[in-house]
Image: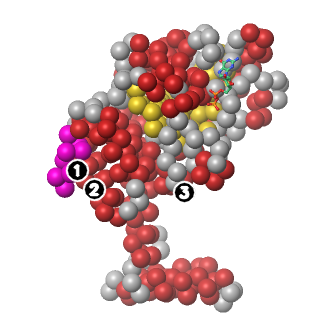
Amino acid sequence: MAEVETLATGVLAGERRALSRAITLIESARPEHRERARALLDQLAGAERSALRIGISGAPGVGKSTFLEAFGLARVAEGQRLAVLAVDPSSPVSGGSILGDKTRMPGLGRSEAAFIRPSPSSATLGGVARRTREAIAVCEAAGFDLVMVETVGVGQSEIMVADMTDIFVVLLSPGGGDELQGVKRGIMEMADLLLINKADGALAEIAERTRAEYAGALHLFRRRAGDPEGYPMARTVSAQTGAGLGEAWEAIRALDAARRESGARAARRRAQSLAWFDAEADGAMIARLKAAPGLEAAWRDIRTAVAAGEMTAGAGVDALLASAAQHFGRKPPDAP
Ligand code: GDP
């Protein structure tokens, strides 16, 4: 594990190569790599560094890369260091956009103060979630001020990203009256800031109208306990001209400051840590049960019986628990 220690030292010193290698390690599914990744994360946790974590979601083409580039370079110009992590569970399947690609954010890609990491090509959303959480932890330990987690506005990925960030921003395109229908209610409920992008040129007026519609819709949602007046908020921006980007950053900063002050940010992080633990614990327990020698065969037989209609699902679960209990030399636990 000397290797892990060297890696940890490099990450803590903010060395980019160590950071890249650390993230590659946590992205690996190989058991010996997992073990090392865990040891690394344990070491890094000791640093107790913390970044502002911002989730950015939006449909392909809405302007996420353009926004991240302009927004990120403005933070860099202020002397901040930022990491951009991309989450795109759809990419391995669809072969679609590879988020985080340096060519999408050329200025940030060249900046010493920025670190961009594309989405891992992982199959499952659960796998992507774990890796992203761990990558956030590594970036925080490396001393970044800001960690931006980018996701495409499809499927479950934004719920996941909202669950691992402090502030959740949704980017939208200027649209007609039916625009509201395109955004799932769940995403609206999670958003702290809705940014109507492309508010420039001929689109400026439409963007403002769209903003007003969303602002109206946001009134239907209850303000989160402790959040200042006016949040969640809808604003217009132009990632291309830079209009409104400063105000958007101010809105993010003000919300974060209020949440730190009230303890809401710490509470949110505690809840997220617990959710992370619960998810990992559930996954690990099930994986180990399934892999237990002897149990694996029983599991398979029971599934076959259930599929054939020879056993009900409930009876199958009882049978499974009974064989697990037998395997571990115990009485099966009572149902909750
Ligand atoms: P992503 O798929 O969400 O990452 O979107 P991109 O950043 O790649 O942008 C998609 C397209 O929208 C590109 O052609 C951009 O030039 C354009 N675009 C992005 N931001 C703006 C903006 O603020 N105004 C205008 N007019 N076009 C924009």
Q: Specify start and end residues of the magenta stretch as a single range.
A: 1-9
In the picture, the quarter occupied by the N terminus is bottom left
Q: Are marks 3 and 1 in contact (CB under 8 Å)?
A: no
The total of numbered circles placed on residues is 3
- The residue at the far left in this view is 2
In the rendering, which numbered label is found on residue 36? 2
Q: Nearest the camera: 311 or 29?
A: 29
Q: Nearest the camera: 336 or 46?
A: 46
Q: Which residue is mark 3?
A: 124
Q: Position of residue 245 (x, y in %)?
A: 55, 14
In the rendering, which numbered label is found on residue 304? none
Disc 2 from disc 1: Cα separation:
7 Å
Q: Quadrant of residue 151?
A: top right
| Drawn side of residue 109 relative to residue 137, left or right | right
Q: Are marks 2 and 1 in contact (CB under 8 Å)?
A: yes
At label 1, which amino acid type do we have?
A: Val
Mark 2 is surrounded, within 10 Å at the Cα level, by few (under 14), some (14 to 19) or many (20 or more) other residues, namely some
Q: Secondary structure at mark 2?
A: helix
Q: Which residue is mark 1?
A: 4
| Drawn side of residue 220 relative to residue 163, left or right | right
Mark 1 is surrounded, within 10 Å at the Cα level, by few (under 14), some (14 to 19) or many (20 or more) other residues, namely some
